[in-house]
Amino acid sequence: MLIPLLIGCATVFITMTIQIAAVVRILKYLFRIVARTKDGISGSKNTTYVISSIMVMLFVAHLFQVAVWAVLFMQVGEFSDFQTAFYHSMVNFASLGYGDIVMSEHWRILGSIEACAGVLMFGVSAGAMLSIMSFILTQDVRLKAFATELKKAKYE
């Protein structure tokens, strides 16, 4: 059980690296857009487009992480085709736990480790999206102007 556990932990480290790289890339993308505009994101691009682009980037990062786990499952001999390995990996990563495909007793701890990693990575994505959306909203000049008007109205 120690070998599968160590392999699983190493794979979690790989998925964390992928997630961190995706979030850093997204932040660079966001800051590049903000640097190009005077009026915040909404001044140059549609805010919906920017948020949608970021969500797609995060989703692709998750798919890549699922693929890493699927390759691992194939390497340890649990699956012979990538399609089945990817499906099983996606079910684990999303913590669905269908149970329609079960790995052997020796390697089944990998499924639990992947589920834990998936919950952690989805949490990182949710936190990143919350922070990014908050940043976008504070960059919006129209919102700043509205907030200024509210403050003036409050003190008059």
Image (cartoon, rainbow, N blue to C red):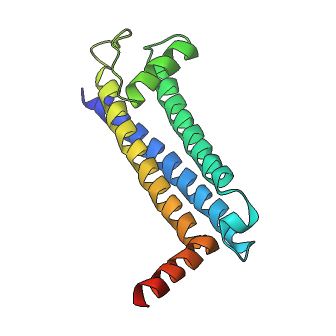
Name, please, the residue furthest toward the front. 156
Residue 81 falls left or right of residue 11: right
| Residue 19 pos. (x, y %) | 50, 48
Please give the count of numbered marks on the rendered protein: 0
| Residue 61 pos. (x, y %) | 56, 41
Q: Identify the image quadrant of residue 98.
A: top left
Q: Identify the image quadrant of residue 137.
A: bottom right
Residue visible at 64% across and 68% down in the picture: 31
Q: Decide which of 25, 40 is in the foreground and name it.
A: 40
Q: From this view, report whether residue 141 is shown above or below residue 22.
A: below
| Residue 111 pos. (x, y %) | 34, 25
Image quadrant in which the C terminus is located: bottom left
Q: From this view, report whether residue 6 is shown above or below residue 78.
A: below
Residue visible at 56% across and 71% down in the picture: 143
Q: Decide which of 122, 34 is in the foreground and name it.
A: 34
Name, please, the residue furthest toward the left. 1
| Residue 62 pos. (x, y %) | 52, 38
Q: From this view, report whether residue 69 is shown above or below residue 99.
A: below
Q: Decide which of 10, 146 is in the foreground and name it.
A: 146
Residue visible at 74% across and 73% down in the picture: 37
Name, please, the residue furthest toward the bottom. 156
Residue visible at 43% across and 49% down in the picture: 126
Residue 55 falls left or right of residue 29: left
Q: From this view, report whether residue 45 is shown above or below residue 48.
A: below
Q: Identify the image quadrant of residue 94.
A: top left
Image quadrant in which the N terminus is located: top left
